[in-house]
Image (cartoon, rainbow, N blue to C red):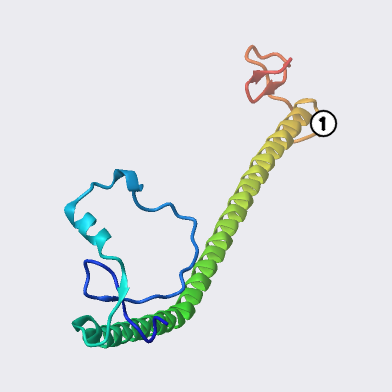
Amino acid sequence: MLEREYLVLPGSPIPVTVEMAEMEDDDVGMPERSLKESAKRHRDADNAPHTAKPGTVEHAYGPKWRAMEKKHKQEMDDLKKKQEEEKEALLKEQTPKLRQENERVVREEREHQEKKRRQESNLQNQVQMENMRVMQMQLQKMQNLQQMQEMSAGGGGGGGMGVPPMGPMGGNQPMGPMGPLG
């Protein structure tokens, strides 16, 4: 019925366009008791909604209002469609670049982890090498000390080799690197 006729509400020359509403559970607006009474409200209440009668200005402008609303709705639909197409195009353009960037970040992270692992491995090798060097030095010292002890104990004869040096008082006390032994 409302597609052929024009429903006009009080206080507005624009006919009402009716569409199916989506039910929402929103409590929007103010309760009626908080609205202030006004002369306009009373006047509008006296003029009930009505359909425009043929031959009236309301009836003459009804089709123009409806055509304008259809045009605006079509323009909005076209604009929404264009915006969605632009969004899809931009997303299509951005997606491979995001993938490339993510791959680059992952690759750089792997390279960083590999470099860190190599540095840790090199550090461990250096520590092991230093430990081996210290152990070799200790072993060499022990071997030197053992050789000196063997020499001072009288092992080996002749030519001054293996003969312990004389003590400070000319005694036969063997001498070590730090002084007389025993």
**Residue 71, how many percent across, how many down?**
30, 87
- Name the one closer to the observer, 30 or 10: 10
Viewer-closest of 170 and 155: 155
Where does the image place residue 78, in percent across and percent down from the top left? Answer: 36, 86
Q: Which residue sits at x=33%, y=85%?
A: 70
The answer to whether residue 157 is left or right of residue 13 is: right
Q: Secondary structure at mark 1?
A: loop
Q: In this rendering, would 95 be left or right of 11? A: right
* Depth order, front residue of 39/35: 39
Q: Quadrant of residue 91?
A: bottom left
Amino acid type, label 1: Gly
Q: Quadrant of residue 85?
A: bottom left
| Left or right relative to 70: residue 114 | right
Q: From what the image shows, is residue 104 above or below residue 85?
A: above
Disc 1 crowd rating (10 Å Cα; few below 14, some 14-19, many 20+) is few
Mark 1, residue position? 155
Question: In this view of the protein, which residue sits in the foreground, 91 or 81?
Answer: 81
| Residue at 81 percent of width and 34 percent of height | 156
Would you place residue 169 above or below residue 111 in this image? above
| Any part of residue 161 in sight | no
| On-image quarter of the N terminus | bottom left
Residue ranking furthest to the top = 169
Residue 51 in sight here: yes
Q: x and y percent of residue 82 in the render?
A: 37, 85
Q: Is residue 28 above or below residue 50?
A: above
Q: Look at 48% across and 78% down and name the residue there.
A: 95
Question: Image point 62% across, 14% down: which residue?
Answer: 168
